[in-house]
Amino acid sequence: MAKLVSRRKALVVGGGLMLAGCDRIAPTKPARSAFLGAEDLTYRVNRLLTPRNALAPEFTGADVSPIFRSNGTAHPGSPDYAKLLAGNFADWRLHVGGMVNRPLAISLDQLKKLPQRTQITRHDCVEGWSAIGRWTGPVLGPILQFAGLSSAARFIVFHCYDDFGGTAYYESIDLADAFHPQTILAWALNGQPLPVPNGAPLRLRVERQLGYKQAKYLHAIEAVASLDQIGGGKGGYWEDVADYAWFAGI
Ligand SMILES: Nc1nc2c(c(=O)[nH]1)N[C@H]1C(S)=C(S)[C@@H](COP(=O)(O)O)O[C@H]1N2
Ligand SMILES: [Mo]
């Protein structure tokens, strides 16, 4: 990540949000391939059939699963992460960079002061389990707008603290999902700060897609015009290593 986000300066603007200047990453290739592969077809058909802002079902407090199990990484385990955790994430920042006019470095306290949403939704993992949880966090769209998202950006990439044998977990979504009203950066699960096994201090909730898109342990989000230069080019960790579908609509 050092190459993506290197902090140069910090300034304070209205609302008390701290902005940190970051070096831009130059997009090198124009766009994701226009070739209509099977997966692209699923994606396009889904986008045609599902209204852009159709909501994922929401549930009631009575439906909340007694235990929201953890899957994949349950603790990132790196010294960097351990240090942030020991300090109760006071020194943690969410870096917002890439194709934005105003790169941001946002603290947890600042994130909690942004417009919030609480939603009770069902998480479906491809490994064959589901759980219902109540998630709270700032809506992603206004954060991207505040950062001055470039009109050339087409995808938002989420970079995580944990890695699998040297490859950091990452995921990406398109702008329809990034600006969807239920797409939030959750810092709370069932009214409590996010437990470490579920992605502390912050994770993505993109409720119309499967579990592996819900990136945990966030430390940076990056706006890009193409996914070609990100990881293996397929838009996510499991997409790259196991050919999971990039668009995991449910
Ligand atoms: N950073 C990171 N995010 C991740 C994973 C992971 O291993 N690392 N696993 C994914 C998968 S496959 C699922 S089902 C959910 C699990 O979320 P949970 O641990 O809160 O149940 O997180 C997703 N996001
Ligand atoms: Mo999963």
Image (tube, rainbow, N blue to C red):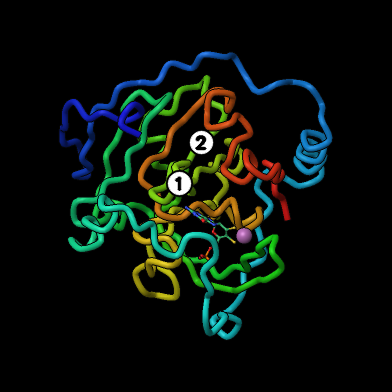
What's the residue at 18%, 61% (across, down)? 87
Q: CA distance from mark 2 to mark 1?
A: 10 Å
Q: What is the three-letter code of the residue carrying label 2? A: Ile
Q: Position of residue 44 (x, y in %)?
A: 78, 36
Q: Is residue 9 above or below residue 55?
A: above
Mark 2 surroundings: few (<14), some (14-19) or many (≥20) residues within 10 A:
many
Q: Is residue 41 above or below residue 62?
A: above
Q: Nearer the viewer, mark 2 or mark 1?
A: 2
Element at label 1: helix
* Nearer the observer, 178 or 247: 247
Q: Is residue 3 left or right of residue 135?
A: left
Is the C-beta separation of discs 2 and 1 under 8 Å? Answer: yes
What's the residue at 67%, 65% (across, down)? 57
Residue, disc 2: 156
Q: Position of residue 38 (x, y in %)?
A: 84, 35
Residue, disc 1: 140
What's the residue at 33%, 52% (across, down)? 114
Q: Position of residue 27 (x, y in %)?
A: 48, 17
